[in-house]
Amino acid sequence: MTGTARIVLVEDDPAVAELVTLYLRNAGFAITHAPTAAKARELFAEMHPALVILDLGLPDTDGNALFAEIRARSDTPVLALTARAEEKLAGLDAGMDDFVTKPFDPRELVARVRAVLRRAPQHLPHASAPVLERHERAGVERDGRHRARFRGAVRPLPRSSRSMRARSSSVRTMGSPYH
Ligand code: CA
């Protein structure tokens, strides 16, 4: 299922974008590139991607601000890229699903994309009660098929709470040999 997942790559560095696109296409993903935050907003609305890879250093909008916009609208997983390692903990605390610091091995990025997608909501057999309660409080209606109606759009129920995801990501990432 993850093999055909649609991914939006937000990255202003053409060399990085080309490399990441090549590796992810070879891994079977459908990837679309946005060189600016403006283009990313457009693609996000059009494509409803399964995952967004987000460079935090963009020319037109701060990547953290773009992340906040995405998160305000959906629980779409976001994997952040940055050259500044000190941004990592803040990003994970803010609810980013994973973080890769530049320079990176593109094979590591592909592996992390797969890992994030494995944790994504459509792969969960059941949504947990606390998540449902949280979203019902936010005005979401359940339809009994692991989907919810939110602001008029039917979408899969989101996965477990962001703080839990951030914690598990932090622990896993801190234990990794990659940085
Ligand atoms: Ca950049």
Image (cartoon, grey):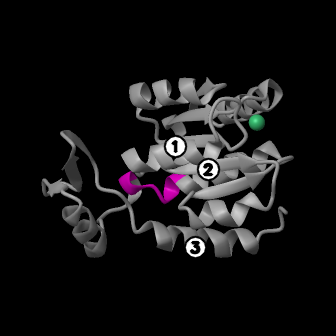
Looking at the rendering, the stretch of residues picked out in magenta corresponds to 117-122
Q: Quadrant of the C terminus?
A: bottom right
Point out residue 157 in the picture as x, y percentages from the top left corner: 29, 55
**Which residue in the structure is indicated by mark 3?**
168
At a point 63% along the width and 59% down the height, the residue shown is 91
How far apart are the two marked residues, 2 and 1, measured between alpha carbons?
8 Å
Residue 39 is labelled as none
Between discs 2 and 3, the one toward the N terminus: 2
Residue 95 in the figure: left or right of residue 128: right
Q: Are marks 2 and 1 in contact (CB under 8 Å)?
A: yes
Determine the secondary structure under disc 3: helix
Residue 79 is labelled as 2
Q: Please rate how many residues cluster around mark 3, counting C-alpha atoms within 10 Å: few if below 14, some from 14 to 19, many from 20.
A: some
Specify the principal SS of the magenta part.
helix
Is 98 part of what is drawn in magenta? no
Is 120 part of what is drawn in magenta? yes
The amino acid beneath tag 1 is Leu
Residue 9 in the figure: left or right of residue 142: right
The amino acid beneath tag 2 is Leu
Q: Residue 90 occupies which quadrant of the picture?
A: bottom right
**Which residue in the structure is indicated by mark 1?**
51
Determine the secondary structure under disc 2: strand
Point out residue 1 in the picture as x, y percentages from the top left corner: 45, 43
The amino acid beneath tag 3 is Ser
Q: Quadrant of ligand 1?
A: top right
